[in-house]
Each structure stands twice: as structure tokens, then as C-alpha cells.
Amino acid sequence: MAAPTRLGVLVSGKGSNLRNLVERGYRVVAVATNRPSCGAAAFARERGLPLGEFSQRRFGSVEERDAAMQVWLQGHGVELVVNAGYDRILTPGFVAAFRDRIINVHPSLLPAFAGGMDAVERALARGVAITGCTVHVVTEEVDAGPILVQAAVPVLPGDTVETLRARIQAEEHRILPEAIELLAQASPSLRQ
Ligand code: GAR
């Protein structure tokens, strides 16, 4: 059963992870994006989810952007922030405000292919036999926080970025909910 944790989901992409959480019955109380035209933002509007738009051009600095996003998420009672295809690095101030309450899904077996939004491309170009995905706690250091769940995905002969990404994302849709459950069990304050 889905945990009742109040989730704030940060998105920049097509939104398959956001959709998966919503369809599994997770309590998504806020969606924040830096790209109001992305597929994930369109999905949030379609479902009537509160959507916060934090395009960098509206702010004088990344600190101001993240401070505004922090206040907005806190105003929606967010208990756990989920980076689901969010393509900005969170500022130390934001990370501190939600210490141990931010998780990120990354399409590689961290620490391999850390950083950036092109981990699948780099794994394929490197010729690895096995890659995968990771859900980890976000700290100030990019993609280096404690790992909660990982899934391995074999690279198959003839794989393209698209075919490999699709198999990795199928695993992301399984392990992101698993990580949320794990964290809810481990942190009494995330339970209601
Ligand atoms: C996901 O595959 C996620 O792992 C990746 O962006 C994709 C978003 O897909 N994140 C990163 O690369 C973070 N560095 P979605 O918008 O369909 O959920």
C-alpha cells in the first residue's frame, strides 16, 4: 500500500516517474518545475496537482530560486522531496532545509556515471555490460548521498539509448516507490 507521506515532486522532463507515483496512489501534494513546458508539468496540470513554476529567468540567482521553491513546497506541507527527472542541482540552503528528506532517481548504478542528464548515453558509449538505476538521498555533493535502492539492467546487443532507457525507466518505476516506502519505515516523522 502506498505510504501516506506528503510528496513534493521536482520535475523537468517527460514525467513518467511522476505519473507512476500518482497512478500508484502516492500522495503528491506539490509538483515543482524549472521547465513549465515539460511533459511532467503538463501532466500535473491535467491532473489538477498544485504546480509551482520556478524558471531560473524569474530569479536573480539559484539561491533565490531555491529559496522560493522551498517556501512554496513547505507551504504545501511537503514532507519528502522527490527529484524525478529534475535537471538542476539543488543549493546547499535547500538541501539543509529538507535534510535527509530529499531523494533522487538517477539512471545508472551510482557511483558509476554520476552527474548530468546523459548517464544512459555515457553507459552505452562506454560499452558496459550492466548498468541500471539508483535512488539515493540528496546531499550537497551531486549524486553522492546514501544509496537506498538500486536495480541492475543488462545492456543487450543492439541496444540504442531509447531501448536501454526504456528498460532502465521500467526499473525506476519499481524502485522509486520502494525507496519511498523504505524511508517512510525508517523515519517516524514521515509516517502519519
Ligand atoms: C529519469 O530516467 C531519471 O532517472 C533521469 O531523468 C529521467 C526522467 O524521466 N534523471 C537524471 O538523469 C538525473 N541526473 P521522467 O521525466 O520520465 O520521469
Image (spheres, helix red, strand yellow):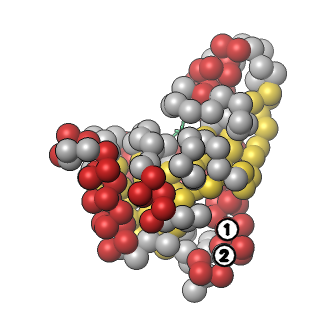
Check disc 2 and report its element: helix, strand or loop.
Answer: loop
Q: Is residue 75 shown left or right of residue 158?
A: left
Give the residue drawn at x 70%, y 38%: 110
Would you say residue 50 is visible in this rendering? no
For badge 2, the amino acid type reads Ser
Query: Count the marks: how many?
Result: 2
Residue furthest to the bottom in view is 192
Residue 183 marker: 1
Check disc 1 and report its element: helix, strand or loop.
Answer: helix
The answer to which of 150 and 144 lies nearer the viewer is: 144
Distance from the alpha carbon under mark 1 to that under mark 2: 6 Å
Give the residue drawn at x 20%, y 47%: 59
Q: Position of residue 39 (x, y in %)?
A: 37, 42
Q: Position of residue 98 (x, y in %)?
A: 49, 65
Q: Is residue 93 above or below residue 129?
A: below
Q: Quadrant of residue 130?
A: top right
Give the residue drawn at x 20%, y 44%: 60
Is the residue marked 2 within 8 Å of ligand 1, measured from its CB? Answer: no
Q: Is residue 139 shown left or right of residue 88?
A: right
Residue at the spot of label 2:
187
Q: Is residue 122 above or below residue 167?
A: above
Is the residue marked 1 within 8 Å of ligand 1, measured from its CB? Answer: no
Q: Is residue 160 above or below residue 79?
A: above
Q: Are marks 1 and 2 in contact (CB under 8 Å)?
A: yes
Would you say residue 82 is visible in this rendering? yes
Give the residue drawn at x 45%, y 52%: 92
Q: Quadrant of residue 121?
A: top right
Q: Position of residue 119 (x, y in %)?
A: 60, 28
Q: Position of residue 15 (x, y in %)?
A: 45, 46
Q: Is residue 182 shown left or right of residue 12?
A: right
